[in-house]
Amino acid sequence: MATSTQQKQELFKAIWAIAEDLRNSVDGWDFKSYVLGILFYRFISENITNYINKMQREADDTDFDYAVFSDEEAIAAKDDLVREKGFFILPSQLFCNVRKRAKSDPNLNVTLSEIFKSIEASAVGTESEDDLKGLFADIDVNSNKLGGTVEKRNEQLTKILNNIGGIDLKGDYEDNQIDLFGDAYEYLMAMYASNAGKSGGEYYTPQEVSELLARIVSHNRQWVNKVYDPACGSGSLLLKFAKILGADNVKQGFFGQELNITTYNLCRINMFLHNINYNKFDIHNGDTLLEPYHWDDEPFDAIVSNPPYSTKWIGDDNPLLINDPRFAPAGVLAPKSKSDLSFTMHMLSWLSTEGTAAIVEFPGVLYRGGKEQKIRQYLIDNNYVDTVIQLPPNLFFGVTIATCIIVLKKSKKENKTLFIDASQLFIHEGNKNKLSPENIETIVDEYAKSRVATSSDRNKHFSALVDNATIAENGYNLSVSSYVEAEDTRPQTDIKELNARIARIVEHENRLRAEIDAIIKELEAETANG
């Protein structure tokens, strides 16, 4: 199999080629829909082909190839395939066959449009209907952005099919050494970060940050029942559990909710791309704070999230929310201008007794006063805050500020909170900072050992285990810098050596003065005798 570096290079080369082809027509950030959509079309085509071929070969039909099978014979297996895979594609509709015919198909745009509708329609009336509905909605094969005429549009579509089809990804996608969809998405973000703006940081979490969160939440666990993200974006956080624990060790599946319709679609596509079957994920579109979907599925063992930073919400303009069981315990709602801690309270409410939640937060939630201070007081007084980790700046697209991670638990053994200052742990890559594997290991190791380490074993410049009473005395300020002593990196001075040097300088000066006085006296004597 190709190495991770080779696979990434193949992927990025193909994406760059498509970007070059569409540079004068489709605006940069908009064209991600074509890249990710066609990549998904290729994946599910190869996924269902590999699945059917494997079954037939296990039944001793060693030469069977679904790609050359007739549509008439294939249709007989439709119901069984939808039940098993969640969707159905005719052999003639497979990516490889459409790509072969693309250059000679004057109605390629119509062909693709009908295939996308057909794939979604195959799930109608079945358990997978909600998981397939609208997955291709963002791929407008008839858009004028692709070209002013049908001929021009089809020419562009052919190029996209060929570039995506040219990526060398041998074997099953889930066995590849790279996170195919995550790497493609991150590369697109990097290419068009200026267009993506702040929203990029809100719905895409860099893979190394996702890994850190998942490593913390899954610490000392071989498996979890359910993983949940109330602002799941493209699903990168949820899917890290499939990589770290193995998809089978997330026993009851992956749950999430997302307000943005585009990223909601991307999340479902991402699940399929990682071979998470439709019956193992439950992703919904909607406002988690006002219309939470998963009431019947909570509590969750593992919660990870990077919710939007300091966005507005209805807050106490809705008098019913203060009685919502998620928010009521704190006795106050998060400010209308800053919804951060409302997400925190929601996650705490849905966290199981033995579970762990790790949340990326805007730093202001750690120290701002007013309602946010009262919510922090509730969290500390009830011993729910397990750890606060200060991250380096400039990790997220469109967000240069240094964010933090708050870890929540409901069954802590002591009334103390761990603070870790990881602000200096990063490598610089391009115009962004990044957590290296060694950086992640260092943070996770500190998180793991600090509960048992003695104060003398602990690096006071990296972490501190602080009594909650001390935090209360400090106005419930959770800023890491308030508890972890910053290291003085200035050159250290040896006082004894400095004093000795000063003494030598003074002695030398006194000797010079004495010599100068002697010379002056000698000159005065000569003048008097003259």
Image (cartoon, helix red, strand yellow):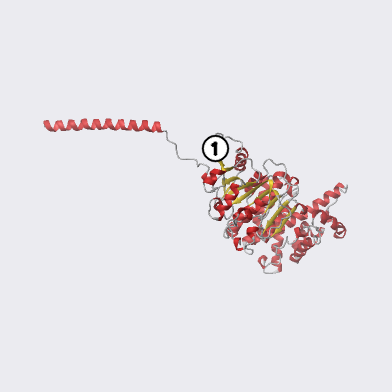
Question: Camera-side residue: 360 or 28?
Answer: 360
Image spot of residue 375 (x, y percent): 58, 52
**Is residue 54 visible in this depiction of the protein?**
yes
Image spot of residue 241 (x, y percent): 70, 47
Q: Is residue 451 above or below residue 10?
A: above
**Is residue 313 visible in this depiction of the protein?**
no
Image spot of residue 194 (x, y percent): 57, 58
Q: Residue at x 62, y 62 (%)?
A: 319
Query: Is the C terminus in the top left, top right, bottom left or bottom right quadrant?
Result: top left
Q: Residue at x 64, y 63 (%)?
A: 26
325 sits to left or right of 95: left
317 sits to left or right of 281: left
Image spot of residue 339 (x, y percent): 60, 57
Judged from the image, the secondary structure of the residue bearing numbered disc 1 is loop
Q: Is residue 230 above or below residue 451?
A: below
Crowd class of label 1 (few under 14; some 14 to 19; many from 20; radius 10 Å):
few
Figure quadrant of residue 454: top right
Q: Which residue is mark 1?
A: 459
Q: Is residue 344 above or below residue 451?
A: below
Query: Is the N terminus in the top left, top right, bottom left or bottom right quadrant?
Result: top right
